[in-house]
């Protein structure tokens, strides 16, 4: 489908990296490198401890704030949890939901992912819903079935207007932080399949405008090839988002502008 209907997103996922003291120099350097443009959305999904400080700096850096998770609970005796309304109060725009590391290390089920997506949407933020297969599932040719189930589960019982606001990030588990990357053809095949699923279930208009990202070791070297694919609308960037020049290079590639290095 024509990419003119979709504004690319480059989302950095800092995971449990960087110190709060490193935020200002990173964003200052990024602001110098990337020009003002409106052809690409940029967000950094940082640890909860960083978000308050980022709220003061993000606007001048032309970067929106993202969180890496959200609580299912609105408030109360849930030690260690962070509620959606707390994120909203810090001008958080995006929230990663269902990352494979949350699924693996915190036993998040597909139904929990669905519930968290609803919480994010109800709070007026945008969920970046992660889906992806393991190496064993790919080798057994179960990729499409597994990803299809994850997408259907994540979007179940959402209203059409809510589905329209979601972002799907395809991250093959075997390529996250491993240095291995799906080929452009492999990534495009799954992202196109996701979009086709959306078209069948929710109609061509929503499929045309829904943004589907690729994660899984996207970096400055392979970003151009991946982002050139017709159904890849940006990236959920891990390690490369911690290096300001690499992150800026990917942003420029998505925005189809040349970086000033």
Image: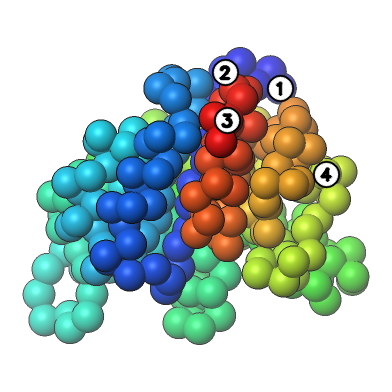
User: Quick one: label 2 or label 3, which is nearer the N terminus?
Assistant: 2
Q: CA distance from mark 1 to mark 2?
A: 9 Å
Residue 109 visible to an observer of this rendering: yes
Q: CA distance from mark 3 to mark 4?
A: 23 Å
**Residue assigned mark 1:** 1
Q: Counting other residues with Cα less than 10 Å from the Cα at mark 4, is it few (<14), some (14-19), or many (20 or more)?
A: some
**Residue assigned mark 2:** 5
Residue 213 falls in image quadrant? top right
Secondary structure of the residue carrying numbered label 1 = loop
**Relative vertical location of residue 117 with respect to residue 34 in this rendering, above or below:** below
User: Quick one: label 1 or label 4, which is nearer the N terminus?
Assistant: 1
Q: Quadrant of the N terminus?
A: top right
Point 22% across, 80% down: residue: 80
- Describe residue 135's horizontal placement relative to residue 259 as left or right: right
Residue 74 pos. (x, y %):
16, 64
Q: Counting other residues with Cα less than 10 Å from the Cα at mark 1, is it few (<14), some (14-19), or many (20 or more)?
A: some
Q: Which is in the foreground here, disc 2 or disc 3?
A: 3
Point 78% across, 58% down: residue: 181
Q: CA distance from mark 2 to mark 3?
A: 24 Å
**Residue assigned mark 3:** 259
Q: CA distance from mark 1 to mark 4?
A: 17 Å
Q: CA distance from mark 1 to mark 3?
A: 28 Å
Residue 137 falls in image quadrant? bottom right
Q: Quadrant of the C terminus?
A: top right
- Describe residue 139's horizontal placement relative to residue 98 as left or right: right
Q: Which is in the foreground here, disc 3 or disc 4?
A: 3
């Amino acid at each position: 489908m024509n990419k003119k209907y979709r504004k690319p997103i480059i989302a950095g996922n800092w995971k449990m990296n960087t110190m709060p003291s490193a935020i200002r120099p990173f964003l200052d350097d990024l602001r110098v490198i990337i020009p003002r443009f409106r052809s690409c959305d940029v967000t950094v999904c940082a640890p909860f401890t960083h978000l308050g400080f980022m709220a003061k700096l993000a606007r001048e850096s032309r970067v929106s704030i993202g969180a890496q998770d959200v609580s299912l609970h609105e408030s109360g005796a849930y030690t260690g949890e962070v509620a959606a309304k707390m994120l909203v109060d810090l001008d958080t725009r995006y929230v990663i939901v269902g990352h494979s590391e949350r699924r693996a290390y915190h036993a998040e089920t597909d139904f929990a992912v669905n519930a968290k997506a609803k919480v994010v949407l109800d709070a007026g933020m945008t969920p970046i819903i992660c889906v992806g297969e393991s190496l064993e599932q790919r080798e057994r040719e179960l990729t499409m079935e597994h990803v299809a189930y994850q997408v259907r589960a994540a979007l179940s019982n959402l209203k059409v207007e809510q589905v329209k606001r979601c972002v799907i990030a395809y991250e093959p588990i075997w390529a996250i932080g491993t240095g291995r990357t799906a080929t452009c053809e492999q990534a495009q095949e799954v992202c196109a399949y996701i979009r086709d699923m959306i078209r069948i279930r929710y109609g061509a208009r929503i499929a045309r405008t829904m943004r589907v990202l690729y994660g899984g070791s996207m970096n400055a070297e392979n970003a151009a090839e991946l982002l050139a694919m017709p159904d890849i609308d940006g990236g959920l960037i891990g390690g490369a988002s911690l290096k300001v020049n690499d992150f800026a290079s990917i942003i420029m590639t998505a925005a189809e502008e040349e970086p000033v290095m």
